[in-house]
Image: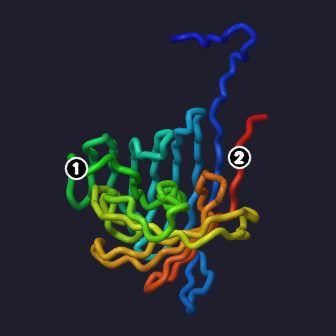
Amino acid sequence: MSKAAAAPGQSIMQRDHKVYQGVIAYLSHKPERMNQERGREFYTLVVHGDGSRTITVHTEIDDRPSVHRDAIYSLDKDWLPLDCMMRLTVGDKFMGTGWMKFYDGYAECETFTATEGRVSQKYALKAPLKTFQNHAIACDSWHFKHYDIAKGGIQSVGQILLSSPDHRGATGPLFYAINMNLNYVGKDKVTVGAGTFEAYHFQFPGTKELLEEHPPYEIWTTADGEFTFLKGGVAGYMQTYYELIEFKEVIPK
């Protein structure tokens, strides 16, 4: 076992990273279920000294069939995806588990699902992947790191991969490719359960490339360069609302 080494005058303890914890509430905005809680998400985010980051997310959706998803997702210092591990249950039964790794020219996935059994995927990429959709709401706001606010208008981040084409991420996990468009609405100040923040208001205009067309999706993120999810809502048949109700930095005593 290696021994810890410290330079003269340097503490033997090392803490170059920061740790954050958050909770996101899942609510319905359908008239007959207005503000009814329909799920929740708990996450821990580690931001390393070089800017790379890893988020561990536990998601629960109570609407039948219920969905439980655990994901560990890592980005490099430029916010480009590195790898993701996932485990999924649907209707309180095992659905699948998998590991994904992203390279400049391809992405690979090793997974086992209740439907497909053992699957190995190697997906050729047209260009290095800018972002990956693992269906955690906490990560939805990170896509906008790749949006040029100075340019404005609807912008494409090109081809992206999803862990599931299902709107709730309730299949797989297996790669599914689409092209993603993003739009910027403007600067805002929003108050959520976690506090009051200077915010950017963005939109996903919607996509017809999924098995079922996804309605437009509004998102507010922090304007501090971290793109922390604050609140969001999906229109159309979904009529769902998400809000950051707890957020804190974890500082050792």
Q: Is residue 133 visible?
A: yes
Residue that appears at 39% across and 59% down? 157
Specify the quadrant that holds the C terminus: top right
Q: Is residue 25 visible?
A: no
Q: Residue at x 44, y 70 (%)?
A: 154
Looking at the rendered structure, which numbered label has been put on residue 123? Answer: 1
Asked whether 21 or 37 is in front, the reply is 21
Residue 158 image position (x, y, % from top left) = 34, 59
Q: Position of residue 183 (x, y in %)?
A: 48, 70
- Examine the image and state in which quarter residue 42 appears: bottom right
Residue sitting nearer the eye, 67 or 235: 235
| Left or right: 208 in relation to 245 | left
Residue type indicated by callout 2: Glu
- Relative to 186, 64 lies left or right: left
As displayed, is residue 183 above or below residue 116? below
89 and 119: which is toward the camera? 119
Which residue occupies 27% across, 74% down? 211
Q: Secondary structure at mark 1?
A: strand
SS at badge 2: strand
Q: Which residue is mark 2?
A: 249
Q: CA distance from mark 1 to mark 2?
A: 37 Å
State which quadrant residue 207 falls in.
bottom left
Tell me which label, 1 or 2, sits earlier in the chain: 1
Query: Callout 1: few (<14), some (14-19), or many (20+) C-alpha neighbours within 10 Å?
Result: some
